[in-house]
Amino acid sequence: MDFVGRGLAFPIHTDVTGSIALVGGEREIIESIRLILATSPGERPMRPEFGCAIHDLVFAPADTATAGQIAYEVRLSLERWEPRIVVTDVVVRFDEVDQGTLLIDVRYSVRSTNDPRNLVFPFYVIPPHESDEDGA
């Protein structure tokens, strides 16, 4: 499993010994995926292309067109920035409780083990105000 490696825990914190916490194995891949999806391109000055463009869709309507665009952007960013996985599917569904939340289900396999996995990442859009829906 050397291909997966070890890296800093995210968010950065200390472990019980007071050292910077590290993660390894499958946990590092999960944290890497979350970091890629949570980072907006341009947010990192030294790597301005790093991240996922889903953040451009925060003010988009929570509809099937937005869900399709989110799935496309997630697949594109993970294929570019996380070489340790193969993305098999990205399914975006609407949270039935909160109309401003889309749940991004990333289905992938780890290249070194061919082990199928999935990760659900919540994405929040700004729901329309009642006055917006009335046309006022």
Image: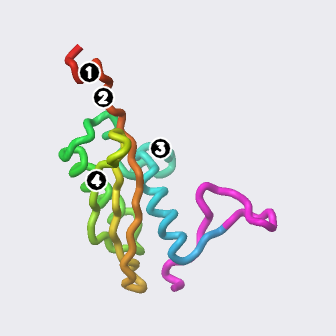
Q: Position of residue 89 (x, y in %)?
A: 27, 67
Q: Is residue 30 left or right of residue 18?
A: left
Mark 4 or mark 3, earlier in chain:
3
Q: Which amino acid type corresponds to the residue marked 1 in the rendered image?
A: Asp
Q: Is residue 49 magenta?
A: no
Q: Main secondary structure of the magenta part?
A: loop
How much space separates mark 1 and mark 4, taking CA atoms?
A: 23 Å
Mark 1 or mark 4, earlier in chain:
4
Q: Which residue is mark 4?
A: 93
What is the number of the mark on residue 43? 3
Front disc: 3 or 2: 2
Q: Residue at x 36, y 62 (%)?
A: 78
For the residues bearing labels 2 and 1, Cβ distance under 8 angstroms: yes
User: Crowding at label 1, few (<14), some or many (≥20) Cα neighbours within 10 Å?
Assistant: few
Q: Is residue 19 magenta?
A: yes
For the residues bearing labels 4 and 2, Cβ distance under 8 angstroms: no
How much space separates mark 3 and mark 2, taking CA atoms?
A: 26 Å
Q: Which amino acid type corresponds to the residue marked 2 in the rendered image?
A: Pro
Magenta residues? Answer: 1-21
